[in-house]
Image: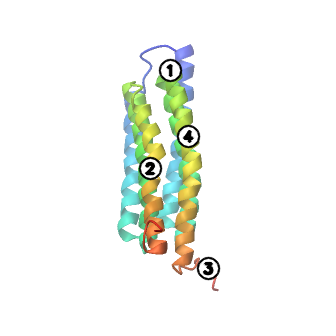
Amino acid sequence: MPTELLLPAGWQVFFVVVLLGCMIALFARFLLGPTNLDRAMIVDAIALVFLCLIAVIAAAVGTGYFFEAILVLSIVGFLSTVAIAKFIEKGRLFDE
Amino acid sequence: MNETMILGGAIALMCFGLAFMVVGVIGIVRFEDVFLRLQAASKCLTFGFTFLVIGAVVLVGDAGDYAKVALAILFQFLTAPVAAQMVARSALVRGIRPAKMDE
């Protein structure tokens, strides 16, 4: 693998601007969302857009450590959505 | 020449993933129901994430980074349907009807 092969600056600006626009649109739907379940689902979607933003930053900087952050956030990112959905369904989180 | 091909392929993969992300976000913002929004979120966004991360790791990654990204994509494919199913079942239990079911 050749070193110093990075994403060019114009493409960096393009990807970051489009992904931030996606995040702002999702946040508007988060504020407008009719039910709390919409909000619980949009938290997951915002986390996924944020993972893509981390991938773009990794391609721009050229550091491999960002992929570990992607791995960890991809594993634990869905827990908040599952917890909120279960709480709204049953009124409590753990069955005693 | 070889580096130009790698750069072009990686940018093409990332643009393909970004197009799916944008389509999924448009679906989430404009659909009228929590079930339709779940469908857009769990399919389009996961697919777009896959191709965008593969493009990034083709551009800058070494072998360990390929393994990490493969594991991240595997966990994303495992956990996104679980979250979507929990939210959909919770919506049905709480009495939210799908938008055009009662017509």
Q: From the top left corner, tell me how far across and down residue A3 is, in percent.
A: 44, 14
The amino acid type, in three-letter code, at marker 2 is Gly
Task: Give the residue number, with chain letter if any, for mark 1.
Answer: B62
Subunit of label 3: B
Q: Is residue A68 in view from this perspective?
A: yes
Q: Are marks 2 and 4 in contact (CB under 8 Å)?
A: no
A94 sits left or right of B41 in the view:
left
Label of residue A77 in the image: 2
| x and y, in percent, of residue A54 in the image | 40, 38
Query: Residue B103, located in which quarter of the rendered image?
Result: bottom right
Disc 1 crowd, CA 10 A, few/some/many (<14, 14-19, 20+): some
Q: Amino acid at mark 3?
A: Lys
Closer to the camera: disc 2 or disc 3? 2
Residue position for label 3? B100
Quarter of the picture containing the N terminus of chain B is: top right
- Per the image, label 4 sits on a secondary structure element best described as helix
Count neighbours of disc 4 (C-alpha within 10 A) and say few if under 14, some if 14 to 19, many if 20 or more.
Answer: many
The residue tagged 4 is B73
Query: In the rendered view, does A12 fall on the left or right side of B51?
Result: left
Q: Chain of mark 1?
A: B
Give the structural element (helix, strand or loop) at label 3.
loop
Q: CA distance from mark 2 to mark 3?
A: 31 Å
